[in-house]
Amino acid sequence: MPKAAQMLRQLAGCGLAWAPVLAAAALLAAPSLSTATLLKSTLWLSFGIVALSLALVWGVAGIFSFGQNAFFGIGGYVFAVTAINVFPATGETLTAMALGACAAAAFAAILGYVTFYGRVGDVYLAIVTLSVTLILYTVMSSTAGPEYHIGQAQLGGFNGMPSVPGIALGSGELGNRQTFAFAVCLAAALYMLLRFLASGRYGRILAGLRENELRMELLGYDVRLHKLAAFVIGGTVAGLGGALFAAWGTFINPAVFSLPQAALVAIWVMVGGRTSLAGAFVGVVVVQWICDQADKVVAQQTPLILGVMLVATVLAFPSGIVPSLSRLPARWRKATPAGNDVHVARPAGAPGAAARGRLVAQHLGKRFGGSVVLEDVSLSFGEAGIDAVIGPNGAGKSTLFGLLTGRHAATQGRIELNGADITRLPAFRRARAGLGIKLQVPGIFLGLTVRENIALARLAPRAHGGAGDASAVLAATSLSGKQDLPASALSHGEQQWLEIAMIVAQNPSVMLLDEPAAGMTRDERNRTVELIRTLSTQRTIVVVEHDMDFIRALGAPVAMLHRGVVFRRGAFAALSSDPEVRDVYLGRRRHAGN
Amino acid sequence: MPGLDGTAVIALSVLTSISILLLTSLGLAVIFGLMRIVNMAHGEFLMIGAFTTTVLVRSAGLPVWLAVLGAPLTCALLGAAVEVLFIRPLYGRRLVETLLATFGLSLILYQAAIDIFGQSSPGIGAPGGFVEIGRYTVSTYSLFLPAAAAAIVALLYLVFKRTRYGLLARAAAQNPDMAAALGVPVRRVNLLTFVLGCALAGLGGGLISPIVAVSPGVGQSYVGQAFMTVVTGGPAFLLGTLCSSVLLGGVANVVSQMFTNLWGLSALLVVAILLVRLLPHGLSGGWTRGL
């Protein structure tokens, strides 16, 4: 039995225990509720489900979408059309519900594919989803004519579709009480499903996306795919909510696509607290209750009240109800197991199994518009353990780094990693092939703990080899004792080390470090030199720096860029005594040409 | 087979659609392009512009030409108040928050319009009568709209290229910290930009008010298309929006004439979504410079 008990405790840790309890209580109470209460509760549950979908997409995955009520409406319309056609023959509407969810999912997939694979920014997603919703509103409103019908179902234009069959499991439509029970079960099941997703490995990936998309990409995660997946799951859930809504009212009209409705979903989630899935339901209850009460005082002013609530929440209370409440027992919640897998058994094979890799640039060139920034650069990294690339400002260091990491596309030349051509690969594929990348600005997940940061790096997909062992890095720095602190609490230098530890956990064969000592104290810088030296016994390391003391201390062979070409190669001492190199750094004209 | 006159009428209709799309998008484009703020109340500013014109014509008895000029004034004043009360406290917060705050404002303005004017209101006729093109007659106003749109774009281009404000606004848009460090009064410039965007929205609403049914929901029926136009226009907020208006407005109008308005609108949506996928940075994404 201890196993069962442990499982139960784990469930409680994910917040999964009290949802079935609440659902059971609701089911038990159902017989004694009045018809009005039953109807209103069922409606609010359908609202809660669409709010839940936005809490997942926005609160967990960090994608703000106005599309949730479009998916809700599509789920409702497809349910209505299918149910009207199928119900008389089969006596059930579950198929219609499933179809509604599928249609919403498909629509979310198309929208998500366009926006995430087009890599348009977050604001654009909000605008695109809102425009699509509004245009759906206009389109559905203009389907009044008798020619707009699908099978037996008249779309009905602005007036909508009446006489939609309710929920039916095979033997006729359910009554109000059974429909309520169905809604409770559906909402509880969806809540637990999303909660489960959000607290497991997938949830950690979504949190990574929310906190730092670029770092996820550099770790080797296919950011587009994961965002799309979250968006489609959200769309499916919203579609189910819409189907329930249409079945509840036996009616649907284009108002589900209207601007106030789009706002409403956002308001529910804002008020409940977007970072909490349970907040979605709390938000619905609070907001709808306020609207109902206000309606008794001033009738027909719902948009006004919603607008005031939205503005007030954004300006005065941006985090919402549930997160504010749950901050109280936060200490108690810290005891829950959260990614203890940092120090669990090392992956099969020797620690640090990655062999030294080889990164080769051949005749690499880059033009931005008319200006040539990099020309015919051929460099090969891998023989020395550590290689350094230096150059004065504007020499082309950053551009070279951008080409190697996949941020820029090369206009000519070829990049090879361990013999494979990676010139055209996106950043996450390079990461999977064994390229570890550290950018200048610390690319860590500030909202997650040190342990969770490293767990995300260990979980990152890679082409071959197990996860790397970051514990040596943690031990060599001051991070071992700070594994449960949020990364935002670390000093600037510690954040740089954490990023290096994450890259090691990713187990790359080549590590590209852009100014790893930027902003460090002298002591931190010395430790970083030691750390890089230790790591270089197993991996190839390329450091791009302009801190000359740091390069000197590393004692690595140096390639110096100047005006977009390789100006000198050799040992640091040889370069530093070279008068031409000095002239370049001092900006003297004499040798600055070629 | 339409003759020369028929072709001219069709072309004029395409031109009118493009102008309407452009006029209803410019205010949004200026605010988004220069401040990276999504003004969700844009549709309501269009609506307020349209109502201002209608009221000035019907109650004050002004001629339409004069009444249209009242629209940007009203919207500019309102826009200044909105910037100070709602936008300024949110600078530095995430984009979504200004978006939600202006969304709330949009709902408030919408309901206020219903409370004041009711769900629909009597319109004003298009001024200027009709002209004959071969066998057809078209309203003079549909000839005037494209001219007005072209004049506004040209004027805006000059403002942003030739005036001190234009230079400061573009500087503040590209690098606000640097601009502030150089002594650009970023707050005042932002206020001006927001007011300009609202005034443009009002002017757009005023100009289309003689040819649409003016109601509190009129803005909402244009704002979706306006958002799509601005997104597909890309970073060059003036000429990019012009290009996307030509493309989207043209497609929507041609499809509408072949089938129905419903198909025209759907075509606009489909083309816009395809554009977002194919050219994520908008039509002007590849331009190295421009407004």
Image (spheres, rainbow, N blue to C red):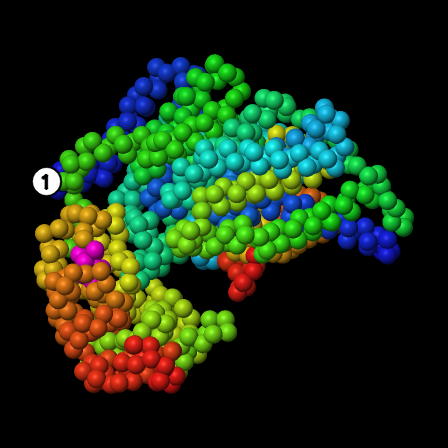
**Apparent side of residue A50 relative to residue A516 in the rendered image (left or right):** right
Q: Which quadrant would residue A55 be assigned to in this image?
A: top left
Q: Which quadrant would residue B284 be assigned to in this image?
A: bottom right
Circle 1 Cα neighbour tier, 10 Å, few/some/many (<14 / 14–19 / ≥20): few
Magenta stretch: give its range.
A492-503
Residue that appears at 35% across and 85% down: A591
Image spot of residue B150 (x, y percent): 69, 51
Image spot of residue A384 (x, y percent): 19, 81
Residue that appears at 15% across and 69% down: A529
Image spot of residue B233 (x, y percent): 57, 54
Q: Is residue A498 magenta?
A: yes
Q: Quadrant of the N terminus of chain A?
A: top left
**Apparent side of residue A540 relative to residue A320 in the rendered image (left or right):** left
Q: Give the prevailing secondary structure in the magenta stretch.
A: helix
Q: Quadrant of the C terminus of chain A?
A: bottom left
Q: Residue A461 versus residue B77: which sits nearer the camera?
A: B77
Task: From this view, report whether residue B266 is shown above or below residue A370.
Answer: above
Q: In the rendered structure, the residue with mark 1 lies on which chain?
A: A
Residue linked to disc 1: A2
Q: Disc 1 residue type? A: Pro
Residue that appears at 15% across and 47% down: A484
Image spot of residue B120 (x, y percent): 67, 26
Residue that appears at 29% across and 40% down: A195
Q: Evaluate whether residue A135 shows in this view.
A: no
**Apparent side of residue A110 relative to residue A449 in the rendered image (left or right):** right
Q: Residue A164 versus residue B204: which sits nearer the camera?
A: B204
